[in-house]
Image (cartoon, helix red, strand yellow):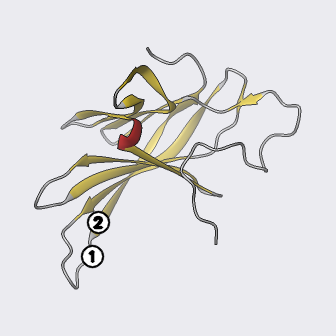
Amino acid sequence: MATPQPSVGPLPEDGPEDGEDIGVPNQYQLRGNGVRITYFPTGAGPLTHDGRIILIYQDSHRSLVFRGAQVQTVVVADFGTCVTATLERTLEIESVAVTLLIPTVFLADGGSTSIRTVLVTTVHTPGVIGRQRENHTVVALAGKAWSGPLPL
């Protein structure tokens, strides 16, 4: 069994034919059920001590920006890329995290495409024997993936 490796790795073997002029998206904008997500796999904006902007999360209660190591990214073969960030930590709930599933996308040079995916919100509760620790809710998202100039 292979261990997933964190990265936005090379193109998989089942990608486009040799000689095709292809690329992968460097930005995604997605929304669904009151949630808006902007994801920059390679980062955007100025470099700060926390790194470049990787993920922007917005809902009716908050707007959060995650940089560099604040985001965990794992490529899972035949599934996609899982992008996770912790929205909040409290004493009573321990933490609330979101995981965005990014499907594999190949683009014509400079192109874009519509995508559909999901965002999983996970509430981690304290470890109590005989109870489930993680509770998940899933939101369907739709939007656009493209390769182009990144915001400064």
Q: Secondary structure at mark 1?
A: loop
Is residue 88 positioned above or below 54 on the image?
below
In the image, what residue occupies the spot 27% across and 34% down?
64
Neighbor class of circle 2 (other Cα within 10 Å; few <14, some 14-19, many 20+) is few
Three-letter amino acid code at the position of disc 1: Gln
Between 108 and 89, the residue placed more toward the observer is 89
On the image, the x and y values in percent for residue 27 come to: 52, 29
Q: Is residue 82 left or right of residue 121?
A: right
Q: Residue at x 18, y 78 (%)?
A: 128
Residue at coordinates 48% horizontally, 39% vertically from top-left? 142
Tell me if residue 108 comes above or below residue 66 in the rendering. Answer: above
Would you say 132 lies left or right of 56 here?
left
- Find disc 1 in the rendering and name its residue: 132
The answer to whether 140 appears left or right of 125 in the picture is right
**In terms of depth relative to the viewer, which is nearer, 29 or 131?**
131
Disc 2: which residue: 135
Placement of the N terminus among the 4 image quadrants: bottom right
The residue furthest left is 92
Q: Determine which quarter of the picture holds residue 46.
A: top left
User: Residue 53 at x, y = what percent?
Assistant: 40, 29
The image quadrant where one finds the C terminus is top left
Distance Cα–Cα, label 1 vs label 2: 7 Å
Q: Position of residue 143 (x, y in %)?
A: 49, 34
Up/down of 32 relative to 48, above or below: below
Residue at horizontal 64%, vertical 58%? Answer: 77
The kind of residue on which mark 2 rests is: Asn
- Secondary structure under tag 2 reads strand
The answer to the question of whether label 1 and label 2 lie on touching residues, with beta carbons closer than 8 A, is: yes
